[in-house]
Amino acid sequence: MGKKQDKAFVCTDCGADFSRWLGQCSVCREWNTVKEVRLGKRTVGRAPGYSGKRSAVQLLSEVDRSRAERISTGIAEFDRVLGQGIVCGSVVLIGGAPGAGKSTLLLQALANGANAGIPVLYVSGEESPQQIAERAYRLGLPADNIKMLAETSVEEICAVLDQEKPQIVVIDSIQVVHTSGSESAPGSIAQVRESAAALTQYAKETNTSIFMVGHVTKDHSLAGPMTLSHIVDAQVVLSSTDDARYRILRADKNRFGSVGELGFFAMTDTGLREVKNPSAMFLSRSGTSSSGSVVTVIWEGTRPLLVEIQALVTESQSGNPRRLAVGMDQNRIAMLLAVLAKHGGMATASDEVYVNVVGGIRIYETSSDLAAVMGIVSSLRDRVIPHDSLYFGEIGLSGEIRPVANGEARLKEAAKHGFRRAVIPRANAPKQAVEGLEIIAVSSLVEALEVFVG
Ligand code: TYD
Ligand code: MG
């Protein structure tokens, strides 16, 4: 190993690494956050008795596939995000702001595992055993088969794992553990990385499933732990909705399932409860509509989700009107405004345009284009969109309305929630009627605007 790899320069804020020192991180743009870290020797961080083993070459047909077995967390929404349960021997990083409910969720999952006769271990480096016992008591969880360990040394943790042989382990949190194999200060990014790498290696060699908790900082990046995404098998983030009543679990990376899958929970005084009907969470409309408000159906992972988009268009007092999108891609909104001006004949160049997705959810797909534009038009004309109407469809640069995936499932979800009218791409028009839903198929923005104006 060359000298070059002995040290690295890592941003303590976003975790990006560089080959040289920078005054300003070129990734997250923070100043004075790039620090030199010593990477230490490559042999570091291995649990005793697990170093230097050489892997044998195998035929794919000889590989024991039963290792990809999954264990249920006993929480359907959690299983869904993981990709139908916990894969044996997998390492999952679970991020979230302090108070999001990471410890609660994992304790609930461990309790379910323990109830099903699976040996589990909760390793806490942050909270005392008393605090965790108190939480378990408050949640009404059976405390007699959840084992716990207050420890922060990776070597000690691995020694206990060797002895106890749990099948599911929680490390709460990865930021406080350290390994003697790393020369860096405890808490530093290099320490977190080396510790995570050592635990991951342990998980793979013993087929133990490990959850590592990582705290996130501002802008939702996992500070420090973000640098772990290539080490772990899956990275999931638990976040709070705007009103703090709900929690959304999202997979950012998943070697064993699809990303973009969401799990929904409500934080109650008896812990996290699954939300079986998430569409209802995101509809703020209470029967009374106001202009600029419109509902669309997005596709989240493997299911449809109804969300409300709000738009506000006001005359600008400055020469450089603002365009702001929360929960949607700002550039996409700018593009849609250009299409609206060119093909819909509605210019907003001298207006401020704000678009917000209700409930703190983020839309990554283009199926919400039509709804966003209709919300903007509704606000611009100060004309209410009936509360039982909904829109979806992608808008192309020439003003055409393009089809989206899973059109029929989206329509069924809308009908299920009492919507009476859906304006959708012509190519998505279902062959069979959807009960209770009037379907208006359009092929251009002009047609959609005609429907709206009536
Ligand atoms: P916690 O799991 O400690 O969050 P994290 O580990 O992500 O920091 O959850 C903390 C919050 O959850 C705290 O604000 C209190 C709240 N909470 C409840 O509302 N009900 C409960 O049953 C529990 C255990 C916590
Ligand atoms: Mg916690």
Image (spheres, rainbow, N blue to C red):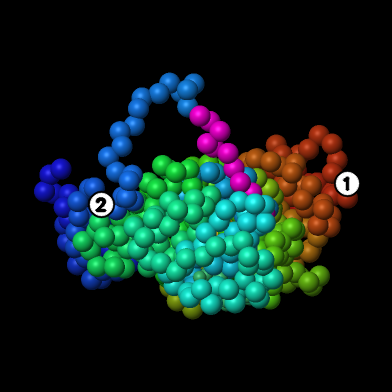
Residue 74: image location, x then y, percent:
67, 54
What is the span of residues highlighted in magenta in the rendered image? 64-74
Q: Quadrant of residue 150?
A: bottom left
Q: Which residue is mark 1?
A: 435
Q: Residues within 10 Å of mark 1 (few under 14, many from 20)?
A: few
User: From where the camera sits, is residue 415 visible?
Assistant: yes
The answer to if 123 sits in the magenta stretch is no
Mark in the foreground, 1 or 2: 2
**Mark identifier at residue 119:** none
Q: Residue 44, labelled with which disc?
A: 2
Task: Tell me the kind of residue under disc 2.
Answer: Val
Q: Residue reaching furthest front?
A: 163
N-term mark: 1 or 2: 2
What residue lies at 57% left-to-right and 53% top-to-bottom? 119
**Is residue 72 part of the magenta span, yes or no?**
yes
Viewer-closest of 83 and 270: 270
For the point 21% across and 61% down, the residue is 183
Q: What is the three-letter code of the residue carrying label 1? A: Glu
Instruction: Give the secondary structure at mark 2.
Output: loop
Q: Say left or right for 449 vs 82.
A: right
Q: Residues within 10 Å of mark 2 (few under 14, many from 20)?
A: some
